[in-house]
């Protein structure tokens, strides 16, 4: 039997087993709360598994390996900045879990009040990151498996998308979280074996460092090998990016208690930093062995073609587990926002729970089909995730963090939320159009100005009102 046949059979058997598990879990865990927030009963080990699986995916095993190939230890800088970006979650997790939220628009509504314009802006801003992640996972899978098997990347993307629905449709968050946990275990095993395989292929760590350009492999100078401009963009766009990623919020909402929600965030941050060390190692190894790849994002695929068949097959299962878990998480997050915050709130407020689950499944198919089209149109893994983070941060970071800090002041209303989001998007969009590489910084500044100005105006207005009443 050819390697391709064995590869697809192995992946098929593994996925079939997980699909069956997902199906039976869906039969047991029915209802819209299980679809949205896992019944708010996920134990700690499942929380850690699903959080970690969510932040992994195509960006780590394709995009960041490609970054390491071209820019060395800069990938580790990406991971350390992302880890730092998790810190605010440690202070917010208790409030988030105990407030019975289901989506990010719920958070904005609680802080700023219910207003249709604010709701629309929040919903659109919320969809940016998970939708970008959907496309990133599809691109990553297509690039790796087309390199390994020779099958057209667009066809691989389509097949992968269809399979992913089997993990989302049965029970939404519940089935996604538990399959994430299983996939997370597979990721850990695959990554460890791949690390030692890379070290052996490259002749050891010292040899790998010797065979790569000093400007990207020296430490600590290699941490900024990608260029200070890009590092600064990561500081303002990527570092706070997960604070506007609804997928992580949903896992906090789904925790069995607030203490475990906080612990899972801290552990996930550390694991992600370790994952980017892994990406750095694989990328630098490939650079030392083959410095002439046309596209750095093909580094992971090329690495696999140089390994024994048994390892290629085993690692392919790891890749499928990694990307599948992130894709299914992103699909579920997008669908929840559309069905709850748009369909239920504005289209059919009296919808029955059983029908809402059916609508959620239909929407899953539609959004995934759109993501497949965009992935085939612009197949660049890291570009999608970085751009989605940048615009989401410009729109939502200040309203969320600023609103959390000022939530007990009883001053903020929908006008402050609208001003902050609109000015953030406008500031980022205008700067991007004018060619600024740090457009996200302008968006953050504009958003902050909008919130602070609104806070001052509303505080003065409230004070004047109280004086007149007295």
Image (cartoon, rainbow, N blue to C red):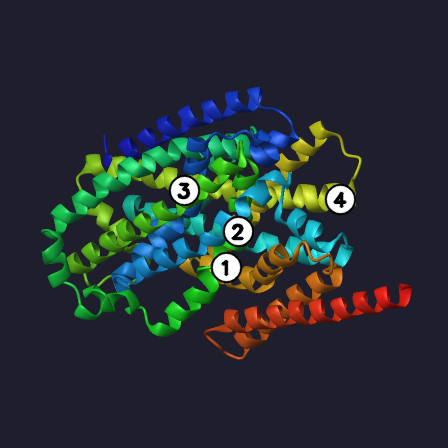
Image position, residue 16 (x, y; %): 41, 26
- Label placed on residue 245: 2
Label 1: how many Cα within 10 Å (few below 14, some 14–19, many 20+): many
Most foreground residue, 251 or 310: 251
Image position, residue 180 (x, y; %): 43, 35
Examine the rendered structure and indicate whether residue 325 appears above or below residue 137. Answer: above
Label 2: how many Cα within 10 Å (few below 14, some 14–19, many 20+): many
Examine the rendered structure and indicate whether residue 396 appears above or below residue 430. Answer: above
Label 3: how many Cα within 10 Å (few below 14, some 14–19, many 20+): many
Q: Which residue is mark 4?
A: 345
Examine the rendered structure and indicate whether residue 190 appears above or below residue 432. Answer: above
Q: Are marks 3 and 4 in contact (CB under 8 Å)?
A: no
Disc 4 is placed on an element classified as: helix
Q: Which residue is mark 3?
A: 52
The Cα atoms of the two marked residues, 1 and 4, are separated by 26 Å
Q: Foreground mark, 3 or 4?
A: 3
Disc 1 is placed on an element classified as: helix
Q: Mark 3 vs mark 4: which is more N-terminal?
A: 3
């Amino acid at each position: 039997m050819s390697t391709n046949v064995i590869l697809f059979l192995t992946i098929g058997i593994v996925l079939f087993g997980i699909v069956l598990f997902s199906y039976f879990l869906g039969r047991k865990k029915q209802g819209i709360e299980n679809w949205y927030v896992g019944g708010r009963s996920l134990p700690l080990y499942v929380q850690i598994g699903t959080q970690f699986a969510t932040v992994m995916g195509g960006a780590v095993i394709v995009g960041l390996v490609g970054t390491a190939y071209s820019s060395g230890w800069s990938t580790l800088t990406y991971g350390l900045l992302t880890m730092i970006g998790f810190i605010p979650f440690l202070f917010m997790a208790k409030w988030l879990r105990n407030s019975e939220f289901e989506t990010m628009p719920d958070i904005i509504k609680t802080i700023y009040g219910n207003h249709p314009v604010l709701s629309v802006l929040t919903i659109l801003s919320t969809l940016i990151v998970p939708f970008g992640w959907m496309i990133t996972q599809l691109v990553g899978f297509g690039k790796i498996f087309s390199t390994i098997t020779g099958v057209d990347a667009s066809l691989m993307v389509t097949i992968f998308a269809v399979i992913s629905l089997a993990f989302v449709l049965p029970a939404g968050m519940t089935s996604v979280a538990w399959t994430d946990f299983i996939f997370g275990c597979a990721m850990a095993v695959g990554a460890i074996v791949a690390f030692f395989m890379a070290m052996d292929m490259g002749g050891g760590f010292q040899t790998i460092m010797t065979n790569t350009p000093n400007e990207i492999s020296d430490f600590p100078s290699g941490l900024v090998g990608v260029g200070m401009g890009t590092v600064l963009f990561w500081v303002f766009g990527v570092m706070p990016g997960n604070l506007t990623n609804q997928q992580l919020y949903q896992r906090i909402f789904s925790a069995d208690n607030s203490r475990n929600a906080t612990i899972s965030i801290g552990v996930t941050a550390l694991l992600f930093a370790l994952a980017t060390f892994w990406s750095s190692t694989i990328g630098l190894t490939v650079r030392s062995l083959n410095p002439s790849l046309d596209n750095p994002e093909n580094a992971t695929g090329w690495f696999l073609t140089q390994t024994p068949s048994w390892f290629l097959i085993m690692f392919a299962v790891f890749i499928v587990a990694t990307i599948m878990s992130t894709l299914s998480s992103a699909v579920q997050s997008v669908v929840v926002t559309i069905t709850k915050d748009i369909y239920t709130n504005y289209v059919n407020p009296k919808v029955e729970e059983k029908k809402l689950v059916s609508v959620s499944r239909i929407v899953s198919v539609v959004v995934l089909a759109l993501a497949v089209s965009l992935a085939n149109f612009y197949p660049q893994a890291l570009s999608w995730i970085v751009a989605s983070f940048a615009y989401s941060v410009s729109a939502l970071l200040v309203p969320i963090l600023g609103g959390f800090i000022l939530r007990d002041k009883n001053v903020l209303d929908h006008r402050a939320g609208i001003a902050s989001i609109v000015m953030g998007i406008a500031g980022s969009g205008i700067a991007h159009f004018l060619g600024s590489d740090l457009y996200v910084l302008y968006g953050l500044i504009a958003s902050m100005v909008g919130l602070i100005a609104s806070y001052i105006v509303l505080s003065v207005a409230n004070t004047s009102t109280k004086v007149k009443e007295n």
